Amino acid sequence: MVTSRFLTLPPTLRHKIYASLFSPLRLTHPNLKTPTHPLLSTSPLICLEALPYLWRHATFDVGTTEGFVGFLSGLETEKVKELRKMVVRGVPFPVYGMRGEEERGYFTHFFTTVLSLFPSLQLDHLTLHDAYHGPDVAEDGWGHNATYEEIGLLVKQSKGFRNVTCCIANDSFMKPVVFKSIVRDMPPTEERHEREPQPRTWDAWVKQRDGEESGAGVEMFACKGGVWEEVKGDYVPEEAGGDGGGEEEVAIEVRIRRGRGADVVQDGVFKDEYSANLGKLFEELSWEEIKERGLFVEGAEVDPTAHL
């Protein structure tokens, strides 16, 4: 039998075959919790031996943040530890507190906060697609700031990955944002959110975090006309075309690389009171119970900026 002949190969060679076979495999939401592959049905022994390699080498595309939470919430800790490659669209995550709609309102969490719900997560690579920019998104200053701030959080404090690629449909988030406030009988005021020189500042932050000689770094790539080029020096949206004046939009990738020896395993620590409340909610209730009670606010993937 073919199966028995395959099992006569040395275990180390079989393991290399599994890794090579599953590395190009991309599993998509919602068919993730019971991954399938023709090899797994050849024999119970091969399935038992090969399945861990599928979890470690395949790419799991979970859709949005909601899919990310739903997928990981249904896994045992040992399975979460095995995951190495994931793709997600970082849609905001709005939830009420334990009292539901009796609360004054729900609180919207970034994807970076949601990462802390899953201690032991230690991906080799996370691909994070930005939710606040693109042809089907009502872009505004709140979304521009959310994208910029979330990249900063990934660089400075987030855990759960060794490498992350942030994919943004255009470069509007790299431009300063001005919010104007008009109050009756008061002069109008402006709140201006500037941008630091990038990717230089992000690169300095991750090197400060992991060590100058650790290999940590942040790189930025820009795509115009279908051609990707690494950004040398500081990125200036106006010079690259930006999204104004009817010119072609410039897509951006920000690639964050943690350093050698860095502590990348997600520890489940929440950084502030609001995010800690999310952790407490998930300690008290399961993900299914949260949805059943109407504590999760659906629809953020349709209009992400409306929930900021």
Image (spheres, rainbow, N blue to C red):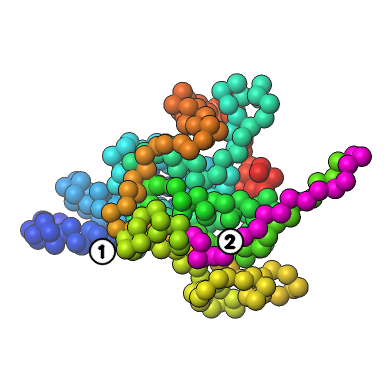
> Residue 195, position in %: x, y?
62, 60
Q: How many numbered marks does the figure carry?
A: 2
The residue where tag 1 is placed is 20
Image quadrant in which the N terminus is located:
bottom left
Q: Nearer the viewer, residue 181 or 77?
A: 181
State left or right for residue 152 relative to residue 86.
Answer: right
Residue 305 visible in image:
yes
Q: Position of residue 276 (x, y in %)?
A: 49, 32
Location of residue 113 in the rendering, given as x and y in whole percent from the top left corner? 50, 41
> Mark 2 vs mark 1: which is more N-terminal?
1
Of 27 and 293, the residue lying toward us: 293
131 is higher (above) or lower (below) than 81: below
Quadrant in which residue 259 is drawn:
bottom left
Magenta stretch: residue 41 in it?
A: no
Q: Amino acid at mark 1?
A: Ser
Residue at x 61%, y 47% (from the top left corner): 301
**Residue in the picture at 59% in, 54% down:** 147
Nearest the eye: 207 or 14? 207
Is the residue marked by circle 1 packed among few (<14), some (14-19), or many (20+) residues within 10 Å?
Answer: some
| Residue 196, numbered circle | 2
Q: Residue at x 65, y 58 (%)?
A: 194
Residue 85 visible to the viewer = no
User: Which residues, given as a range, are shown in magenta?
Assistant: 184-202
Q: Is residue 278 above or below residue 98?
A: below
SS type, badge 1: helix
Q: Quadrant of the C terminus?
A: top right
